[in-house]
Amino acid sequence: MLNNQGRPTNVDNVNSNVGASSGAALLPSEPLLFEVGDKNKSGVDLPKTDTDFSSRLGGFARQTPINLPGLTEPQSMRHYVRMSRLNYSIDAGFYPLGSCTMKHNPRLNEKMARLPGIADIHPLQPQSTVQGAIELMEELGRWLMELTGTGAVAMAPKAGAHGEMCGMMAIKAAHEAKGQGHRKLVLVPESAHGTNPATAAFLGYKVKEIKARKDGTVDVQAVKDALDENVAGIMLTNPNTCGLFEPDVIEIADAVHEAGAYFYCDGANFNAIMGVVRPGDLGIDAMHINLHKTFSTPHGGGGPGAGPVVLSDALAPYAPLPYVKRDGDAVSLVENQDGSDDHLGRMSAFHGQMGMYVRALTFKLSHGADGIEQAARDAVLNANYLKAKLSDVFNAPFDGQPCMHEVLFDDSSLKGTGVSTLDLAKAMIDEGYHPMTMYFPLVVHGAMLIEPTESESLHTLDQFIGTMRELMADAKAGNIDRFVNAPMKAPMRRLDETQAARSPHLRWDEPEDDAAVAAAE
Amino acid sequence: MRYLPHSNRDRKVMMDAIGIQSSDELFAKVPSKVFNTAKLDLPDHQPEFAVEATIRGFANKNRAAGDGPFFVGAGAYRHHVPASVDHLIQRSEFLTAYTPYQPEISQGTLQMLFEFQTQVANLTGMEVANASMYDGSTATVEAVLMARRLKRRPGIVLSGGLHPQYRDTVATYMGDDEGFVCLPSDPTATEDIIAQIDDTTAAVVVQSPDFFGNLRDLRPIAEAAHEKGALLIAVFTEVISLGAIESPGAQGADIVVGEGQSIGNPLTFGGPYVGLMATRPNLVRQMPGRVCGETVDAEGNRGFVLTLSTREQHIRRDKATSNICTNSGLCALAFSIHMSLLGQKGLSQMAALSHQQAYKTADALTAIEGVELVNEHYFNEFTVRLQKAAAPIVEALAEKGVLGGVPVSRLEPGKKELENLLVVAATELTSDADIAAFAAALKEVI
């Protein structure tokens, strides 16, 4: 056992808890920082304050304890390296998480983001001293507009959902400017990401769900039937979350425009069509681009992202602040409203996600127009290869047409086996894979959404196909122990999410006797 | 193409398996008039060294903060970040994972988030924190929305000490909503915000240290708000200040939000940063964003999962507390590693040094004729009033190699009474030589 400072209380127990063998260290169970740290230690050496230092904080000085331990550098290195070993990652294995575009993260991107002329510049230093940064924003914007066939881009949004908010705010502003503020309905197909209805509802819109057709695509007639003078816009993902290109997208866009509404396109799946189809040609008015997905900036365990929004000419005047303006050789960022324009204001402080912009531009320059198109084609080819090799054992609900960059299966093949989509996913962990996206989209039962991306080799795909076929054969043969008990080879067994939600324990609490000692000191 | 594993032979094998001749056939559902019709005005792929040269070309046109005396703050601060922080966040296992949807193979990220939440809660003097927001300004918006949900009242009062771009961000989300009040810019911290609180107020939003550097006593505001059944949202942009000044939690705040960039994260022209949000246990179910909680696995071992997800968009869709999904995971990791290295001891020392260098800067500048200190109490940032407009003076200083603060007019254009104000920040990286150089340059250009 370790005591709450992380020190062994007796030698015999140390081995059983932390693990003295090298094998245990490679699959560690790491105590919490608060259990190994020490409040009197610091891993950062700082100079002393001057001998005549005296705080001028007056009555504002902190009286209550901070209660945070420190680690020296070797302790910290070990703590986080051991924790890192408990994570699955793209670099370690195939990560076909549908809708998330888990592609390779080139390390040149990281190197470029760390140049002092990028990492060590302040958003509010004089613009004359950051011309290169503003030019970089302009150049990335040019790539985004060129790839999407649009004439304007709002760089500010900080992630995809923030981009959705930006696009929908622009739509709302455009309606209000035209005296169409009474339009209170937004059409959202039932297969949409949860962020779509959440965004629309936030802006005060009522969400009207559009049913999918039997083939998994949006029913153009259902859209037409729903359109009237109260509809502000439609939020449509294309390719959609079933992994299908919406064949009637142009007709839908035309109908939406004819009804005086706007077309918001969720760009989460842009990877399938980049360099091949320009969304502007499909009639979109706004589309966010997840730089951390499509342009690999990277995912970082849940962000940071960046969600620039390309805009049609109709919405361009309503783009948020700041935006890049060019005047001959000089570029500037327009940071404030001058009262004469329609810009919708600020979505955040400062100028967006420069650290992500530089990574995305590096990715694009590396790939070039040819590489971007090839990447989209390979991503789509990989998904269709998986589909071709698996659809005799897994049920593809919308068969009879090619998928785009992700393939969707339902759980009908598992019926009667006692194995659920969740069990199958956990068994994949034991086989060395990160599971696909499960139970999304909501339009099919027990959904399994597999997105291989362009980064995977034929060899990896073949191995994965072999594993998936073998798992399905085992499920059908009634060998369900490896499913319902899975994962057995992961750092942890299945975790109890119900208990976590029922009695939330969201922070480490100091053991009471320790707190009493601290208070007495 | 170095990032694409397939040879043409591989592609042929795969197309044969699918039963197609060309990958064009996979795009059969794309209307032909929009399929591959545009010739893009973009270059083809390039070797790594060529790309690097292009990006360096952009970077080299910028003046890095570390290239000379630097006193710019106003919401983003240049602090020392230990080399090991940047090494650790580039570990493949952290950098190339995503949101920990599969907790059994994501305990590294989840344990980090649990530790991060505890660190943020303790720093702010609150009980619980979420697993990060985009940045301080968007966290402020989320706090305002959360307060409205909790109180079912429209009234939101923003202090005139709130960072103007935070105010503008909140204003974008509030629109013309009834009950939304922004007090005028308040460089001297003399506004009477308590007078604005009434029975329709959901929350008052007060920043300390404020945009101008003033330290504000939150206690009487918290009391007045609570008396009327309203909440106090406390905001900070300099998280290092919590190492020296009393926590907002101890002063009665109900929701605390702020910018965490100073710990672990470089300036990077304004983003990506990491928004911090902490609150009281009874308000958690209206808190937006991801939250990590402790639980056990099937063998009874301690583990961590994302929890309370019934608040979130992927479950609740149009009834969610926020549309936030991807947040600032890797920036939160950088924050947490740096904070674990500092410990309370290192943080207090960093705060003391930042405070000391700030008052030495203030002393040096106010020794110049025509430079007047506006603040009574400040931490590492203060405002001086010059005898003429501050913006051209900052440009003149930049020409002399000194980045000498932020003219208030850059964020508050067209307000005559603010035109001569200059906001100046110092940190532990500000040297005595930098201060002397700043004072000498200012004397020349003033």
Image (spheres, coloured by chain):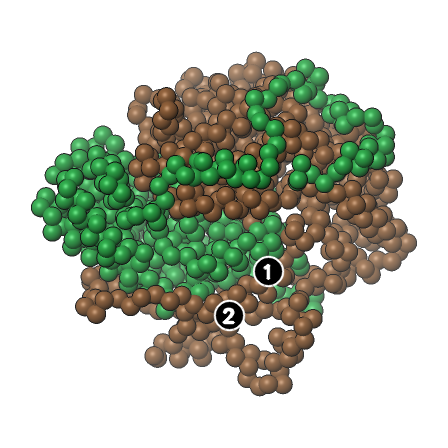
Chain colours: A brown, B green
Q: Is mark 1 on a helix, strand or loop?
A: helix
Q: Residue at x 56, y 49 (%)?
A: A300
> What chain is tagged by disc 1?
A
Q: What is the tally of numbered marks visible in this picture?
A: 2
| Front in this rendered view, residue A232 or B377 | B377
What percent of the width, then of the height, locates residue A434? 70, 51
In terms of image quadrants, where is residue B178? Answer: top left
Residue positioned 65% across, 55% down in the render: A88
Q: Residue at x 71, y 31 (%)?
A: A377
User: In the image, what residue type sits under mark 2?
Assistant: Gln
Q: Check chain identity for marks 1 and 2: say if they share one.
A: yes
Label 1: which residue?
Answer: A84
Residue type marked 1: Ser
Give the camera-side residue of B306 and A56: A56
Q: In this view, does B320 lie to the left or right of A473?
A: left
Label 2 crowding class (10 Å Cα cut-off): few <14, some 14-19, many 20+?
some
Compared with residue A258, is residue B82 higher up or lower down, i.e. above or below? Answer: below
Residue extending farthest to the top is: A258
Name the image quarter holding residue B429.
bottom left
Find disc 2 in the rendering and name its residue.
A75
Residue A40 position, x and y percent, is: 39, 74
Q: Quadrant of the C terminus of chain A?
A: bottom left
Identified at 70% across, 27% down, the residue is A245
* Residue B91 position within the rendered picture, expressed as x and y whole percent measured from the top left: 57, 56
Relative horizontal placement of residue A337, taking residue B145 as reference (left or right): left
Which is more N-terminal, label 2 or label 1? 2
Residue B203 visible in image: no
